[in-house]
Image (cartoon, rainbow, N blue to C red):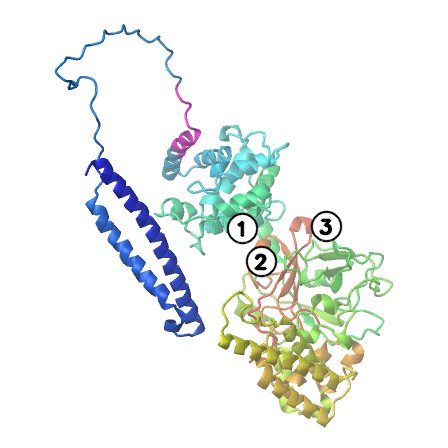
Amino acid sequence: MTPSTGNFIRTLLLCTLAVFLFIFLFLFWVVLEEVVYAWAEGLDIADAVEPTRLIALAGMGFVTALMPLLLRRFPARPAVVRRTGKAKAKTSGKARVKAPERPVTPPAESAPPAPAPPDPTVLRNQRAQELLLAFTRGNSVETAWELGLLDLQNPQFLAEPPFGLFFVMPYAVAANRPGFRRDTPAGWPEFASLSRAERDAAGVIFTCLTGSEDDRDRLSDAGSPLGLGLLNPLLQLGFAVESYWGLEEPAPDRTVFDLIYRGGTPPMPKWRIVRARLATGNSELIAAAVQVVRLVVGYGLLPSAEEGAAVKKEIRSVPALLLVRGPRRSDAQPESPACRIGGLPCLGRAPWPRAKSGEPLAFAAQMDLAEVKAATGFQLLPDAGSLAFFIGNLSRKDGRFDHAVVYVDDTGGGPTAPPGDMRPVSEVFAADLTMTGRGEVLRDQFPCWPLSLHALGIPYTADRAERRQAIKHFARFGTLHAMLTRWLARNSGGPGLLRWFCARYLLTVLKLDFAEVEAPQPPGADGSPFDARKQWAYEERQTLLNRFGRFIDEFEHWIGERSFWQEMTSADVEQLGHTLERVWADFSVFQKTAWPNSVNDFYRIMLRALASAPDDVFALEPDPVRQLVDDSLLLPGYDETHHQMFGRGASVLGGDAFHIGEHMLLQLAGDPVAGWFPSGVCQFWISPTALEERDWSAVTFLYEIDDSVPTTDDDDETDAA
């Protein structure tokens, strides 16, 4: 057999092997899919897989395994090359006549070919390796700047490892210069052309990109004339760097340089996310870096440590004021307390503030500055007037909550009526069903609670135990839930204490859960084969869901048109108990919200709703309970979430770290008795410069809520009256 014939047969066998292998893999995938489906549905695998497919799979596997044996019989051989030129041709005894040779004309001389232009990618990689080697040896900002320029000049490599985020330095400096356009930059600046202030700014960014958390803290400790303005962008840069490299809570003294460039194998960074956000112009990393450049270049030099120490000393010298709630005031009382939460504001000639959408903001608190200044001795505060605090909708998912702080120099004229287009505050703030204000519970404003101011007299750095001990001198912590539980244990309310609000509350939670139930899909809707078990489960689920809907309709019909606060009879209370038992027995699979466990839970739910209801409804509260709320429930209920002015605020999710260089003007804690959000904190922050200039529009707002914090758990230290 000639080599060419063997090579042809070998090629034919290889093609056949490829076809057989494809068929084998296809059959294997089909069989595997049937096995997985049978396992997931709890079926017998032998019944789910067709025997013919198993036979075909075994046959194709056997044939595919034989093909390599056949290929060995036909190894690849080089083809025979026929010789030409000097080889003599065989003839019939006659010599071949040699043809006369033609004169060979030498080719004309041609110019040498032009050298190929150097590949920019190759040059870039060569220069990158040189710079990266120099950087790992010296860790200099100038070398990192050149590495960043290479990325900006070659956008296809932007933000890729191992250069990382070095491009941020030249980008931020160029963005701070006049005439910069993100899509068509005029040119990226060389390090040698930077001014001294720009080099300082590059050094600050370089420290964030390669340094440690301690290094960033030392930079923020340097302070600034605007009240540690560098702190926020430095924190954002630090978070962005750790997120980019995938560093999860590194040690404060470990630098990014040691972890990434000297730490062995670097992690896979999230460079695609950085590049995508940069392309859309929505990069928090770039925004923070540009803010650093603007601050440093605007001041000409990095602020001194002495300036920062003076700012921090001033902030920490202002004593923290604990705001203790007094007995509830009626809306009918003509004079409003000087310091209060809830009620109506006294704005004088000032207009009612509105959100960016035009919707009126909800009034939260008003503080008399003369009382605050007398309690703190803080000289930057005005000698007279008051501050009114307003809050917008706290249910926004983007975290951009509307707020306003209004300075009122003349509170004469009495309370200011809310605008006609203002929504009830219970729709804006409430996060608890007892506070939602459905039907007759609806509130146009929060109840009015006077506040007394008490200086805690503890250092700014006091720990949790010290703060708790200082607060106990003025009021005890305790939740309304805990107090009502103890009171109900000592004083049996009796069936007459329950009102039809409890039935309507249960109806509301049942409707909410029913609306959240996803309708079951019939088997086969997704193209899967018919399954008797699935069909049975679908019919059972659909039947139970229909029963749940009919049960809610019957329950609503039973409630009828009864008023929220109409008393229930003994028979009504007994029927409500039977209804609750049936709910738990038949429909607990649909529960998502907090259902009452027993009739006793209704007492707490109703009394809690009465405590924050309008005046006419609050008057329905039993006298001992009203006295309990007015005399004992003076704090929101949790040891770190209390109402406060100045000092160190409560840290729920760590957002207060962005305001270390600012004064906490007011902290409002989650306060179910006051009628607003049940947990978390709202904080109003202002820089020392803005406070000195009386720029109340510069006040920033922070709202944080931790869902893991209980809102009804008992407290061992609650002092129930």
Residue 58 versus residue 619: which sits nearer the camera? 58
- Residue that badge 1 annotates: 235
- Residue that badge 3 annotates: 695
Q: Amino acid at mark 3?
A: Asp
Rendered residue at 70%/57% (across/down): 402
Q: Quadrant of the N terminus?
A: top left
In the image, residue 145 above or below residue 431: above
Crowd around label 1: few <14 · some 14–19 · many ≥20 (10 Å): some
- Residue that badge 2 annotates: 655
Mark-to-mark CA distance, 1 and 2: 11 Å
Q: Which residues are magenta?
A: 115-128
In the image, residue 333 above or below residue 586: above
Rendered residue at 20%/17% (across/down): 85
Crowd around label 3: few <14 · some 14–19 · many ≥20 (10 Å): some
Q: Quadrant of the C terminus?
A: bottom right
Residue 718 versus residue 487: which sits nearer the camera? 487
Q: Amino acid at mark 2?
A: Gly
Contact between labelled residues 2 and 1, with CB atoms less than 8 Å apart: no
